[in-house]
């Protein structure tokens, strides 16, 4: 069965410090992985998708198939990064996106 | 302003009653989804629909039912058979097959059953 694990429920760092939100997955095939974010009083929205290999708002995430991880990183945290972050896996090759979500990590950036 | 509207924001029901949560989208998306979120847990897929008049069970469909009579609407009924109905429910949509688009979420409905 597919599973996504985010080991940290809460993560607190100071502004300007590096941030790493951990995500591990279990899936036998080649997954498509995502990070979704929910800022205060906003809807859950896509932050980035691994296949795009983009940097969004300074965040990057590298798929490590050997360690089955997809950690989200940012070198210098900003206060506006405070939010709830969800890692998600899509096991389907095509058709509907039946995402499997992790439990989420609440990131707080302290001034 | 395009988006997904879920109503109501808060819903209270007595145990044993069925309740229907509304989800409407004006994004012209083909696919729609219902997720359930419980404290400390990720979102879990209840039902999804890729096209009008068709829907499939997700991972936790027991005790729920849906319909997809119109492209823009995907209501979820929480039946009395659902053992733990109190939760936060999120509706989402995507463009559909052949075209990737991220999940667009609604603001959610918090259901409390006593």
Image (tube, rainbow, N blue to C red):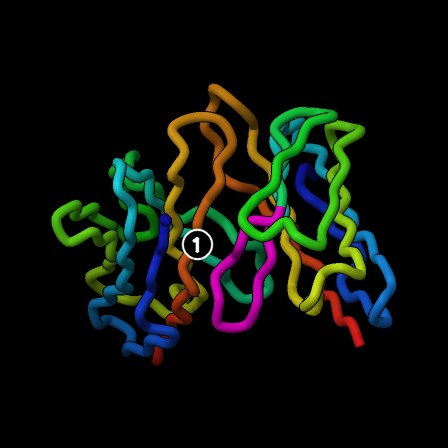
Residue found 76% across the figure and 62% down from its top? B9
Give the image quarter of residue B67. top right
- Residue at the spot of label 1: A101
Q: Residue furthest top?
A: B98
Percent x, y of residue B87: 66, 66
Q: Sort mark 1 into few (<14), some (14-19) or many (20+) by Cα contacts within 10 Å.
A: many
Seen in the picture, residue A51 relative to A67 is either above or below; the reply is above
Residue in view at x 27 percent, y 37 percent? A29
Which residues are the magenta region? B35-46
Quadrant in which the C terminus of chain A appears: bottom left
- Judged left or right of residue B25, residue A3 is left
Residue A46 vs residue B19, the one in the foreground: B19
Image coords of residue B50 (percent x, y) = 61, 28
Q: Nearer the viewer, residue A10 or A88?
A: A88
Q: Is residue A39 above or below residue B77?
A: below
Whether B15 is among the magenta residues is: no
B39 drawn magenta:
yes
Camera-side residue of A14 and B112: B112
Q: Is residue B98 above or below residue A71?
A: above
Q: Find residue A24 and report its horizontal and vertical position in percent.
A: 26, 57
Name the element at disc 1: strand
**Subunit ID for the residue under disc 1:** A
Residue pictured at 61% horizontal, 41% vertical: B57
**Left or right of residue B17: residue A19:** left
Q: Residue at x 60, y 64 (%)?
A: A41
Using the image, determine if residue B77 lies above or below residue B55.
below
Give the number of callouts.
1
**Residue A15 place in picture, x, y as percent:** 29, 74
In the displayed structure, does residue B7 sit left or right of residue B33? Answer: right
């Amino acid at each position: 069965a597919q599973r996504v694990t985010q080991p940290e429920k809460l993560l607190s760092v100071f502004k300007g410090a590096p941030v790493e939100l951990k995500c591990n997955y279990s899936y036998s095939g080649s997954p498509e992985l995502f990070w979704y974010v929910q800022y205060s009083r906003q809807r859950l929205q896509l932050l980035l998708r691994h296949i795009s290999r983009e940097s969004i708002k300074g965040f990057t995430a590298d798929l490590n198939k050997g360690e089955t991880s997809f950690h989200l990183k940012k070198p210098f945290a900003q206060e506006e990064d405070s939010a709830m972050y969800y890692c998600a896996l899509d096991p389907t090759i095509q058709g509907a996106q039946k995402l499997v979500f992790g439990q989420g990590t609440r990131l707080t950036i302290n001034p | 302003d395009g988006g997904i509207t879920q109503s109501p924001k808060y819903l209270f029901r007595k145990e044993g009653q069925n309740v229907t949560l509304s989800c409407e989208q004006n994004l012209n998306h083909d696919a729609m989804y219902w997720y359930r979120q419980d404290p400390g847990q990720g979102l879990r897929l209840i039902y999804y629909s890729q096209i009008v008049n068709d829907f499939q069970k997700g991972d936790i469909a027991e005790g729920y039912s849906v319909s997809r009579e119109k492209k823009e609407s995907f209501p979820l009924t929480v039946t009395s058979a659902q053992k733990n109905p109190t939760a936060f429910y999120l509706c989402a949509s995507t463009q559909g097959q052949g075209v990737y688009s991220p999940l667009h979420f609604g603001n959610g409905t918090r259901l409390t059953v006593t």
